[in-house]
Image (cartoon, helix red, strand yellow):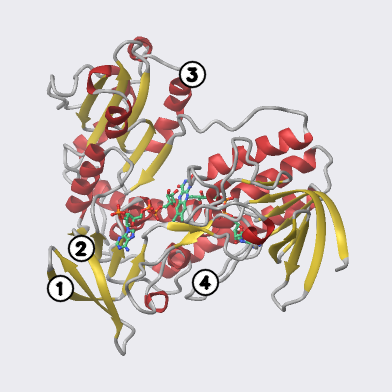
């Protein structure tokens, strides 16, 4: 085996975490290499450098969310007095995806440039661990080379999973790996799954004008606050999304026009319907199966996720892992990035700081936005007792909506979960416009240990939705939370 290059740090995976770690290590003068290779989806979709977030995740999702909101704004404009002649105008999928994809391609190019500038050697090759310090790199023609590195980082992320009960399902459905790159509009779409990805995709497809149904096996948004989840369902229903609840698909047949005849059971009864597209959003699994982990001695759990210590070390001391492929880590871009940077700081910058996963904020764009940080009501009750916590809540109507008939008044909600004794805020939930922008700011206060009294003492900015968070007085179970807003 001939070694073609030696590194201090070799990163497998050029997504959010891998790129951040590689660039940070290079700042300290380490000799860094990075391999990124996209295995095409079963539908043949592939993309460039940058990983899930940039190519098939956060970025295209948020742009399509914006496109859907822009469509909604057309109705709002009429009620705000703008004279429109073409309210019935249909959405142009090809135009939208062209713009989305152009932006992604720009980002792919920028990432390559950044690696180049920082003298990180980039390999567009599939990596496999040969030994604890040797990585085998395979190019798309099958050419092989070996590189050696003192430290190796695995940051290979995850890929969508498919329900196992339907034969050849991969050939009949798409996943989020395909949706953002579909050459033609998805048309009438069935989404299987009821969590983060399913609701976001369902929300924007409905907003863009496509007939959208979501098949829910059990509950919406497992792991998130269930009162908010049920308000999201109400809002989506009001916006035209159809929910098929307590149902699981049992068969999908392709007919001659490539339409999909889906059969499902719902409370013991079989139903069938034809859809143009079936999007499966039933979870993700780590992309570790081709890495040779077990041969090297790296421990994984039954879902293929790598088991790491708190300092991101795998069971082999010089091999580290970060991001979506690691057991117990949040599947989010900012956590993968921060974790990668901190690891590089520790390995090459003489620093000691570890990643902290407490109070990580996130937002779901359904299209009404749900931002949260800390405990959900269910988690708080589970971890503490009902007597140890107080829940403040309010249903509010954003001021702007008073101009419009098209939004229903009870949609938005705020919930604060606090510890009774210390008054520390341990959970913040906001369902309403601009949740990501709003909750990001509050996340600092909560991370710093803010109390309800400190929120009460903070002067709001009027008139905003955000100020509603500072004026909560109704206690769940005691007071009525209905509010008319500003
Ligand atoms: P990835 O970004 O997945 O990167 C891994 C890279 O490694 C990929 O490029 C892969 O091709 C490559 N690779 C795999 N195996 C090999 C190999 N053997 N050799 C070489 N290369 C390999 N997060 C948010 O914070 N906000 C959001 O709004 C959000 N929206 C999302 C929407 C969707 C639809 C999805 C699917 C995800 C979303 N996420 C969001 C999650 C976010 O995208 C991931 O948490 C993040 O990308 C994880 O980064 P990572 O570095 O762990 O892996
Ligand atoms: P999640 O959060 O793992 O959710 C998976 C959803 O799919 C959930 O609603 C499941 O229902 C449902 N599911 C799982 N298997 C099936 C089958 N076989 N049939 C029907 N429904 C099923 O995955 P996401 O893809 O939404 O999000 C993963 C991460 O990606 C997320 O954290 C973001 O960071 C991006 P259940 O509740 O188990 O009944």
Q: Is residue 418 above or below residue 349?
A: above
Question: Disc 1 or 2, which lies upstream in sequence?
Answer: 2
Quarter of image, res 2: bottom right
Residue 426 x/y as whole percent: 37, 23
> Badge 1: how crowded within 10 Å, few (<14), some, or many (20+)?
few
Question: Disc 3 or 4, which lies upstream in sequence?
Answer: 4
Quarter of the image where the N terminus is located = bottom right
Rendered residue at 58%/59% (across/down): 288
Quarter of image, res 215: bottom left
CA gap, disc 1 and disc 3: 52 Å
Question: Disc 1 or 3, which lies upstream in sequence?
Answer: 1
Identify the element where label 3 is drawn.
loop
CA gap, disc 3 and disc 4: 43 Å
In the drawing, what numbered circle is on residue 45? 4
Q: Are marks 1 and 2 in contact (CB under 8 Å)?
A: yes
> Badge 3: how crowded within 10 Å, few (<14), some, or many (20+)?
few
Question: Disc 2 or 4, which lies upstream in sequence?
Answer: 4
Residue named by callout 2: 247
Q: Are marks 3 and 4 in contact (CB under 8 Å)?
A: no
Identify the element where label 4 is drawn.
loop
Residue named by callout 3: 448
Q: Is mark 1 within 8 Å of ligand 2?
A: no
């Amino acid at each position: 085996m001939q070694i073609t290059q030696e590194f201090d740090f070799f990163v497998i995976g050029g997504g959010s975490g891998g790129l951040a770690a590689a660039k940070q290590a290079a700042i300290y003068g380490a000799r860094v290499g990075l391999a990124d290779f996209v295995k095409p989806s079963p539908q043949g979709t592939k993309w460039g450098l940058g990983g899930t977030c940039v190519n098939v995740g956060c970025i295209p999702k948020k742009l399509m969310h914006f496109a859907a909101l822009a469509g909604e704004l057309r109705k709002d404009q009429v009620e705000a007095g703008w004279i429109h002649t073409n309210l019935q105008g249909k959405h142009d999928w090809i135009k939208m995806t062209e713009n989305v994809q152009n932006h992604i391609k720009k980002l792919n190019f920028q990432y390559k440039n950044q690696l180049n500038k920082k003298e990180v050697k980039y390999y567009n090759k599939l990596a496999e661990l040969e030994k604890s310090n040797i990585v085998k790199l395979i190019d798309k023609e099958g050419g092989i080379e070996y590189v050696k590195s003192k430290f190796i980082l695995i940051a290979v992320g995850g890929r969508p999973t498919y329900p196992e009960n339907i034969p050849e399902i991969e050939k009949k459905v798409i996943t989020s790996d395909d949706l953002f790159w579909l050459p033609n509009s998805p048309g009438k779409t069935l989404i299987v799954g009821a969590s983060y990805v399913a609701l976001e995709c369902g929300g924007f497809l409905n907003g863009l004008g496509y007939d959208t149904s979501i098949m829910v096996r059990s509950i919406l948004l497992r792991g998130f606050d269930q009162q908010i989840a049920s308000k999201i369902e109400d809002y989506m229903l009001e916006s035209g999304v159809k929910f098929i609840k307590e149902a699981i698909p049992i068969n999908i047949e392709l007919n001659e026009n490539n339409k999909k005849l889906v059969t499902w059971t719902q409370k013991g009864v079989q139903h069938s319907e034809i859809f143009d597209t079936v999007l499966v959003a039933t979870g993700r699994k780590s992309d570790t199966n081709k890495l040779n982990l077990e041969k090297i001695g790296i421990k994984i759990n039954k879902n293929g996720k790598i088991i790491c210590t708190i300092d991101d070390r795998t069971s082999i001391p010089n091999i580290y892992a970060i991001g979506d492929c690691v057991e117990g880590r949040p599947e989010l871009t900012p956590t993968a990035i921060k974790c990668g940077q901190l690891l590089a700081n520790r390995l090459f910058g003489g620093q000691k700081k570890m990643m902290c996963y407490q109070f990580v904020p996130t937002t779901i764009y359904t299209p009404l936005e749900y931002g949260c940080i800390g405990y959900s009501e269910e988690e708080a009750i589970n971890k503490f007792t009902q007597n140890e916590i107080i829940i403040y809540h309010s249903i509010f109507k954003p001021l702007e909506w008073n101009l419009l008939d098209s939004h229903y008044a009870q949609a938005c909600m705020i919930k604060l979960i606090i510890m009774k004794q210390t008054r520390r805020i341990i959970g913040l939930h906001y369902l309403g416009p601009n949740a990501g922008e709003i909750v990001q700011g509050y996340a600092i206060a909560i991370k710093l240990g803010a109390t309800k009294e400190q929120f009460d003492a903070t002067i709001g900015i009027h008139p905003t939705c955000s100020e509603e968070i500072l004026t909560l007085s109704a206690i769940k179970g005691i007071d009525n939370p209905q509010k008319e807003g500003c």
